[in-house]
Amino acid sequence: MHFRVSPNALRDARVNVPGDKSVSHRSLMLGSIAEGRTHVSGFLAGEDCLATAAAMRSLGVSIDQPGPTEMMIDGVGRHGLRPPEGDLDLGNSGTAMRLMAGLLSGQPFSSVLTGDASLNSRPMGRIIKPLTAMGAALESDCDGTPPLQVTGGLRLRGIHYDMPVASAQVKSAVLLAGLYADGITSVVEPAVTRDHTERMLRTMGVTVTTSAGTISMAGGQTLNGCEVRVPADLSSATFIILGALISQDADVLIENVGVNPTRTGVINILQAMGADISLVNPQLLGEEPVADIRVRASRLRGGAVDPALVSLAIDEFPALFVAAAAAKGVTTFTGIGELRVKESDRIAAMAKGMRQLGIRVDESDDGAVVHGGQFKGGEVDSFHDHRVAMSFAMAATIAADDVLIRDVENVDTSFPGFRDCVAGIGADIEV
């Protein structure tokens, strides 16, 4: 499946985007091991989260979907999961793979985690190391990639783990294993990462402390089912923000978006580039802050992006590359080497595609320099990466001619309905 996008003026609009993927994944996993029922509204029914739901059902959890964005989870308690009949297929989701590895390390039964070709090429050594230190046993392919074989029936112990690389997925995997460990589990972050796991654990009655970059939790605590209202996903909203910013004169309001401060680096970076972005109507959904985001077309300017914001915007850099290309001058990204081990090598994927569309990009191992310019028409490869595909779709709205974006099936992993959503604000996009 491919997108063909013709340049077209975006218009003023009020927009809703799907629910937050990170919160949706965690609601399924934590709701499954809680006592009692967890009702999730605003759930992201994308392929990644549905793969997690299928995996939890395979582990003996009753999960009903009474509506497109609603889930009812009858929790089985911390020790109620059952051995699956086969391998657990997590599709394209690195979040699900890494978090499930932590959760399953503490079970009395063994299991195997696998996924599609993209997921099975992604590195898992970063979770194998700390989980092994806790007493778990995980085996991967010789190069540290899935499938992951998780041995059950082992006694876990709490550890104090200094993460070498900032990663919410690694932190969450260790904390989930820590629920089954003896003693205290502590994780030290080298930089702030998204804290949805800690917030949801607290909502479900678990005591989690955070102090000076160290997150600590005692094992053996009980989770209680609760009401989870999932905010709209800021990562998905980023593509609408991008389209409005680089348009001629659009004024767009995106409603009820999660603005957790561990996720808003993309807004900070764009504002530093001159973006007219404001947060209105702030409120809380449980422990998650939300707001409406108002975006007006802006003249962006290049510059050096603050490396301290990288961990707060790690999933949004494909869109930021496009913003940099539309900006006046040169934009320098450093400290973004993590992008090379996402669904694709996102630095290489964005650099190659933008060069094909007439934009100069200079790569380095952990960064890139993007020279502002005019997108021309052409054909680009998404490398089966949903965020790369959506970034180029928005770039194409201001290109000189049509752009064909190849292999966009994986857009549905995070943003089902993307085509209709962007068409609703004036994008000329065909599947």
Image: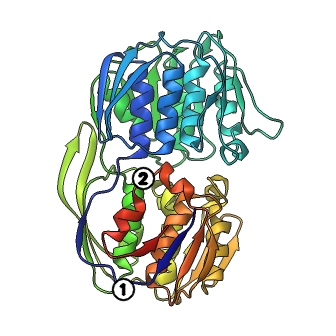
Q: Can residue 431 be seen in this view?
A: yes
Image coordinates of residue 6 in percent, x first then y, are 46, 81
Residue occupying the point 56% across, 19% down: 158
Work out whether 231 lies above or below 107: below
Work out whether 360 lies above or below 70: below
Q: Examine the image and state in which quarter residue 208 appears.
A: top left
Work out whether 126 lies above or below 8: above
Image coordinates of residue 278 in percent, x first then y, are 24, 67
Are the residues at dot 2 and dot 1 in contact (C-beta closer than 8 Å)? no
Report the side of 273 relative to 335 (left or right): left
Name the residue tied to disc 2: 416
Image coordinates of residue 166 in percent, x first then y, are 56, 47
Residue occupying the point 54% across, 40% down: 95
- Comparing 327 with 312, the one in front is 327
Total numbered labels placed on residues in the image = 2
- Comparing 361 with 24, the one in front is 24
Residue occupying the point 59% across, 42% down: 94
Q: Examine the image and state in which quarter residue 147 appears.
A: top right
Name the residue tied to disc 1: 299
Q: How is the image coloured?
A: rainbow
**Which of the two discs, 2 and 1, sits closer to the camera?**
2
The amino acid type, in three-letter code, at marker 1 is Arg
